[in-house]
Amino acid sequence: MSPLRRRAPAALLLLTLRADALATTRHDAHIRALLDGAGVGGSYELTELESGFCNDVYRADCPEIATPLVVKIFSDMAKARCDGPCRGVVDRAVGEAGLGPRILVRTDDALVADFVPGATLGEADVRRDGCKLAISEIAPKLRQLHALATPPPLPDAPAALWRGVDAMLSRCGDATISQKVLAREAARMRRAVDAVAAADVLGHGDLKPSNVLLVDGRTTFIDFELSGPNYRGYDIYKLFRTKALPPVPDDELLRFVEAYLGDGAAPGDLGREALVRSLLAAARSLDAPVVVIFRDAARCVYRSRGACRALLEELRDDDAKTFIVVAAAADGDAGSQEDDAPRRALPPLPAPPAASANYD
């Protein structure tokens, strides 16, 4: 048997068929209208697919077309998380970009898409062979997804993560913990996340392994009900979150992030540039001139293009009030706890870059 998960065990065949009969009866008229909208006016054979807790999903085999179709009918829960005109717009944009199934029909209540004959990934598939598949296939596709523009009429704010949380809070009903306590905790979490990250990419929002299909060695993304502007790290977290396996090793996660960033970028650049820019922004907000000291053998500056570019921008600004000092780690403050500790020899600081240097 393939290591990839299979859809339904044979022992549940009778239950699956019974559930299928009930569900297709409930949605039959709706499905008929959706297939008509997709240009399929003849007969069809419907099979209920394994789906998440949100939606009813069916495979439609139609004699008049070669490729099966998928019909997805949104549940009340899915509708609560996203306004009607916004449902399915990311699915359509992703399909047009070649990162997901092609969407044939989109309504406020349902989607019709091409069927992808792939195997659903599991946690073990993402982690197998040092995350080989995730690094080679998923990381570059996730970079492409995050580079897409947010399709209208999806709002740019709030982040899709908090939009979903707010929707769930509005439906929590008689929870053991009061709704006010939950809302206050959600607000605290949002402030903490927004202090260190920006919701500046088009995120999937639910990038668990089961929402990635493998077809002939290539991957494609499905199920974008929770997508929208989001934090890039949230999709990566969802992909590697695990219930049964040990946490992903740091070196494997680092290789994934490097593959995600692509050629010409290093994950450390983002962190160092963010550090430098945040310190400079804080300095500008003060009334008096200030001195900003960078330590750690200058690694935060001259070994990061982004951080170096931020410093150059500050130095060339006639209105800047910040004095910048780059210090080796050994140049500690008098009286520090490291005074009596042996210090390793550090290389000399590199010369500052020329003003005309091109760091694009």
Image (cartoon, rainbow, N blue to C red):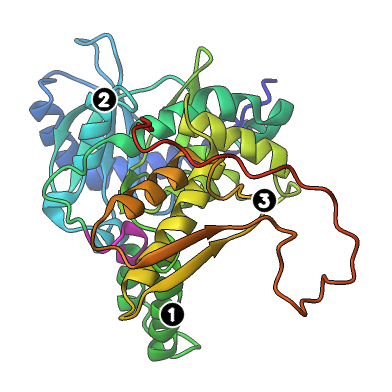
- In this orientation, which residue lies closer to the viewer: 344 or 122? 344
Residue 297 circle label: 3
Q: Amino acid at mark 1?
A: Arg
Residue on which the image places disc 2? 97
Residue 127 on image: x %, y %: 67, 34
**Residue nearest the viewer, comparing 33 with 241:** 241
Q: Nearer the viewer, mark 3 or mark 1?
A: 3
Task: Tell us which disc is closer to us: 2 or 1.
Answer: 1
Q: Which mark is residue 188?
A: 1
As drawn, is 177 to the left or to the right of 48? right
Q: Is residue 110 left or right of residue 232?
A: left
Residue 222's quadrant in the figure? top left
Whether residue 28 can be seen here: no
The structure residue drawn at horizontal position 55% and vertical position 40%, both measured from the top left corner, is 351
Task: Tell me the crowding category of disc 1: few under 14, some 14 to 19, or many 20 or more residues within 10 angstroms, Cα based.
Answer: few
Q: For the residue labelled by badge 1, is the local secondary structure a helix, a strand or a loop?
A: helix
Residue type marked 2: Ala
Q: CA distance from mark 3 to mark 1?
A: 36 Å
Label 2 vs label 3, nearer the camera: 3
